[in-house]
Image (cartoon, rainbow, N blue to C red):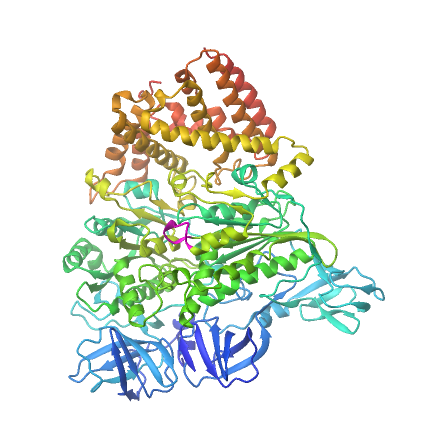
Amino acid sequence: MRVSGPLVEVEGVEGLSMLELITVGPQRIIAETVAIVGNKATLQAYEYTGGLKAGDVAAATGDELSGLMGPGLLGQVFDGLMRPLSSAPMWLTPERSGSLADPVVLAREWTFNPTAVAGTNVSPGDILGTVPESGSVEHRVLVPAGVFGELSWLAQESRVRGVDPIAVVAGTSVTLAEPSPIRRARPFRSRNTDAVPLHTGQRVLDLMFPVARGAAATVPGGFGTGKTMMLQQIAKWSDADVIVYVGCGERGNEMADVLAGLSQLEDARTGGKLIDRTVIIANTSNMPMMAREASIFTGITVAEYYRDMGYDVVVIADSTSRWAEALREFANRNGDLPAEEGYPANLSSELASFYERAGRVTTLGGQTASVTVIGAVSPPGGDMTEPVTTDSQRFVRSLWMLDRDLAYSRHYPAVSWTGSFARDAEELGAWHAANGRPDWAARRERAIALLAESDRLAELAEIIGSSSLPAQERVLLLGGRLLRDGVLMQNALNANDAFCSTGKAAALLDLVLDVVDACQRLIERGVSATTIEQVDLGPVLRAREECGPADAAAVRARGVEFLMELETLK
Amino acid sequence: MMDLRGASPGQGEAAAPAPAVRFAPQVSHGDIRELRGPLLVVGGVHGVGWDEFATVDMARGECRHGLVLEVDHDLATLQVLESTDGMSLEGIRIRFDGRPLHVQVGTEWLGRVCNGRGEPLDGGPPVTGTATLPVSGWPLNPVYRDPPQEPVLTGISVIDGLATLVRGQKLPIFSVPGLPHLTLATQIAAQATAGGQTFRVVFAAMGLTHADIAYVRDRLEERSAGGELTLLLNAADDPVIERILTPRIALTIAEHLAYTEGHDVLVIMSDMTSYAEAVREVSAARREIPARRGYPGYLYSDLATLYERCGRVKGRDGSVTIVPVLTMPGGDITHPVPDLTGYITEGQIVLSQDVAARGIYPPVDVLSSLSRLMRSGAGKGRTREDHLDVAAQVLAALARARQATELAELVGEAALSETDRSYIKYRTLVEEGLFDQGRDEVRSLADTLDRAWAALAALPKQELTMLSTALLEKYLPKGDDGE
């Protein structure tokens, strides 16, 4: 046996297959088979390997790395290997049982309410029954993939444990909970191609760079650009049924903060707590590195599990860079030839295998459901040309690039309007048009043009001074500032502003564009640009914080008042 | 490995307080195969585990120490803490400890001065303790963490006002050689209080010059004499690889003081760049594939195992707050050490040469500095209702003032608009009134915030868009408001 950090090489274990789990050493540390040469196997260990020595025992398990999927996931925290952290001790020492064998989880009993009828024919994805949980998300127990035929037995309404059978289909026993291999996508019937927006409650995203349900988005941002804060806002406010938050190699305090924050906040749509629709996968940066690599796939498998029940799910992974670093670390120890910046050559295919598990699909049971993937990237040195950032961009539909200059001037969320994109914007515009907002796309284009023009003018003004610009251009400069500070900027700490409804966002944008139009008319009437610049714009800029989160009417009323006052300028 | 179970921190308190844990009889090995840089490869060993601690006995009675980096059949690769200088393949015996390095922890560390391996430098007896814990520590279950939310008041305006430190946070100081980062760090150590209580301080010096070490000892003498300070000193000419252990020992002591003894502990680690260089040296000797600038790909995870040891635990009194200090080579914030540190820590205090040149102490570049936990540790119910909004306004106005200053350099101040001129005036006021401070000066938070309001009063009222009408009404100094 050879041990070097998480890399372990063992000899003489017969009949191993790739990705099979092995336990090594007296503490039965979990490791995964990543290479087999003759009678030697290379393993990546999922725990601290301190004290592991030549001569220690290794035993094959015959299983792939799997998570136990069943009731009791929502509102809970798991580590990267899907082991519950709430029942784990304060210090995470290596001697913990695997996710399929946690005694606390296995002993827990649930109420099973059958809904199918015994004697009928069932196929994969059909609902056998439901399990009530604390939150509003109904837990549906489905016929697993690959199981067809007559439902010969179905349990009565009863208290059952996860390992207990609740049905027999064509001779196959179905248990309440099922182990699901994390590295394989769960099957579905077909992919849907129509675009339906995911409303995130964040104006800069919903108005400028929207993401469709079932699409993938990536958020690259150097440290201090507010990446985590933005992702937390999306976790809190997006209109999905289930959120899976993967803290992959990030801070422990942050995970505690997410947990505490979600436990306090109410879900406006259901009246329950936000935590009851959330599953947290926490593999903090000081937890074993290889479990970090697994955590991303664990998270997406949980998401697919809920998708199969017919829900819209959002997976938030913070940060995919830490996951890529775990890949690199292991590849290096394994002596693989490095490609760019030491990353292994399969980096981009690994990234693709993650992002491509996003999708809006028709499930096996025939329901429309989606997994939206949002992955953060932490580029070293803020270098946007590094491999994880550039590769991620190829596999996503929306890019939300965070800008350090914006963050330094405390413009949050610091989404850059020049570096970001939304490939589905056109289709989403069509969706908005079909749903009562015909001018959505045109307004978005006008806002983008105004930002670009005002950026250009700002650069010019820095050289020649803004007072040397023509009056019309000075108004555009002012309009850019209004758009940035009054619409795109959003205060996550303000109860009125943390979340923004579609209607309020549209009203705020209309307000700014109307003010710009009104100012242009004033200029035409001969009012000087200096006079306009000295107008107190407070009512426009404070509208986002002073009007309720869904109070579009208040914004419009404020707009009418402000424009009337503006008209009186001379 | 045999001993890991009984020695994990959660259970360590219950372990018998045995002095000097050593396992006799120890087999010693003399089959040295290779010496390269800090690495030593020994053959013919059996039953040696990865990350085990070892003692190297040299010919003339000298004794060095090492950690197992790799075991491959009967070969073990050791990193020798005190370097392999003067070693030869013959005449060396290695004794393995049977487990990763452990230290004894307890309140006995307070008031002591030790070297980077925890051996006394103050002439006292070896430090004993009430429990023995592995220096690498174990990850704290995130579910047990309490999110940090009580402000730490340092009495330093720029920190308390604009980047509030919070109990259980990790907030590094990024500096460049020549700037007073140690002065600032020791000022924090000397003045910091949380809820009116002072901190126990564990200071880990890595690669500091003797002059710096003397300065630190001098500045913190009062705390040391009061039995509130532990100094672990690895000087610039001390063994390089030893630095890899110094912060780990410091944090192990701190965790025990915090979570078992119930103290608020402040850990200062300086200079993390020297630490990272030691890690790089070992990595290079092992011929590992480097990531950025020769640093190994696992530097992020390695630093995280240090920084993540801060925090608060549910249902326990104490806390560990970490202030790492690092010098950015060439002032480059994208250098791997500050970059990776910034990704792990909860914000950063950046010192800048430009600010120092303007005669401001502490020379904090406030626009690049940030405390991520400030939003939970400051404001209504924590410090003062106006705190967060004032801080945001001070910074936003400063960003605008910088633009105005740059413009004035191009077109001359006379060509500026009246608003831009008020920003330039604001900049001077805020720098002199708020940012600049004496090296021993302790300012109350109310004083700090009042100074901020005084500077903001130089701006026209319509520019103060981040402050609500109610706050303006209550706090904005009257009389200076001519618009």
Whether A276 is drawn above or below B295: the answer is: above
Whether B450 is drawn above or below B204: the answer is: above
Residue A84 is situated, as x and y percent measured from the top left of the image, at 55, 64
Q: How many numbered discs?
A: 0
- Magenta span: predominant SS is loop
Location of the C terminus of chain A by quadrant is top left
Q: Image quadrant of residue B170?
A: bottom left
Residue B202 is situated, as x and y percent measured from the top left of the image, at 28, 60
Q: Is residue B14 magenta?
A: no
Location of the N terminus of chain A by quadrant is bottom left
Q: Is residue B466 visible?
A: no
Q: Image quadrant of residue B459?
A: top left
Q: Image quadrant of residue B102?
A: bottom left
Residue B364 is situated, as x and y percent measured from the top left of the image, at 27, 43
Residue drawn 80% across the image and 71% down it? A170
Residue drawn 63% across the image and 70% down it? A107
Q: Is residue A103 left or right of residue B439?
A: right
Nearer to us in this view, B322 or B21:
B322
Nearer to us in this view, B53 or A323:
A323
**Highlighted range, magenta:** A379-386
Nearer to us in this view, B302 or A167:
B302
Nearer to us in this view, B300 or B464:
B300
Residue B72 is situated, as x and y percent measured from the top left of the image, at 38, 81
Q: Is residue A396 visible?
A: yes
Whether B392 is drawn above or below B306: the answer is: above
Q: Is residue A381 magenta?
A: yes
Whether B132 is drawn above or below B318: the answer is: below
Q: Residue furthest right?
A: A119
